[in-house]
Structures are given as C-alpha cells and as structure tokens.
Image: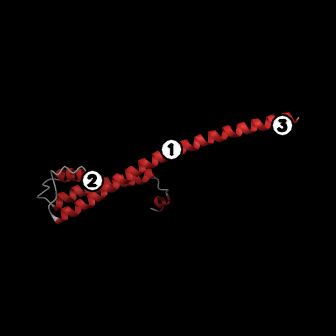
Amino acid sequence: MHRLAATEMTARRAGLWIAVVTILVTIAAGIVMWVVDRQDFPNVWLGLWWAVQTVTTVGYGDVTPTTVAGRGIATVVMLSGIAFVTVVTAAITAVFVESARRRLREASSKEDDERHSEILERLERIEARLR
C-alpha cells in the first residue's frame, strides 16, 4: 500500500483507477439491486443491464428502481458514472494540453537555436572585419 501511495499520480493512472472503481461499482450495484429489489429486477442480468445504463448516463428507463434502497443504490451508481465521465474528459484534455506544450517547447527551442546561430554568424563576421 505504501508503494502505491509513493507512485506519482498521473491523469492516465487516475483515469485507470476511476475506470476500475466504476466497473466494480457497476457490477456490485447490478448484483445488489437484484438482491434488494427482486420485484423490479427479477434476475441479475436485468440488474446489471440497469447498472450499465445508469453509470453510462444513457438511462433508457426500461427498468427503474422503485424501493428506497434501490434508489439509494441508484444514487451511488449515478455519482460514480458522473465521476468516471469527468475524469476521462480531464485525462483526455491533459493529454492534448501536454502535447501542445511539447510542440510549443520544441518550436521555441528551434527558434532559439536559429537565433543563436544567427548571432554567432554576426559575431564571426564582426571578428573577421576586426582582423
């Protein structure tokens, strides 16, 4: 556990962790929904179908929880889905921003190299004239 805490958190790792947690929450919610609300979810597959719809924010509405416990589980799944979409969006954005920064640094470095070469050439010409 200490080794995990010492590892630097990147956007990619954060996205991976959120994805794993979201998948686990989705599977657990589908199973728990089937156990808690057998009237609305007569089999585990219907519970899993509902959980996937909910976590992805599709929400077809063909199956919905009607019990208080079922709605509580639904709340957890909805928040997990929102967190997943948010972190994935942030990770993708971070990749684009870092790529743009890298290109900008490379362009700036090339311009600096060209300027330095130009200055050195001018200094060499001045030095040649002084001889």
Gap between marks 1 and 2 measured at Cα:
32 Å
Task: Tell me the kind of residue under disc 1.
Answer: Ala
Residue 122 is situated, as x and y percent measured from the top left of the image, at 76, 36
Mark number, residue 55: 2
Residue 86 is situated, as x and y percent measured from the top left of the image, at 36, 54
For the point 23% across and 50% down, the residue is 53
Q: What is the count of numbered marks?
A: 3
State the colouring used for the structure image.
secondary structure
Gap between marks 3 and 1 measured at Cα:
40 Å
SS of the residue under disc 2:
helix
Residue identified by numbered label 3 = 127
The front one of 6 and 71 is: 71
Task: Tell me the kind of residue under disc 2.
Answer: Val
The front one of 32 and 80 is: 80
Gap between marks 2 and 3 measured at Cα:
72 Å
SS of the residue under disc 3:
helix
Task: Tell me the kind of residue under disc 3.
Answer: Glu
Q: In this view, does 41 lie to the left or right of 88?
A: left
From the image, which quarter does the C terminus lie in? Answer: top right
User: In which image quadrant can residue 65 be found?
Assistant: bottom left
Q: Do the residues labelled 3 and 1 touch (CB within 8 Å)?
A: no
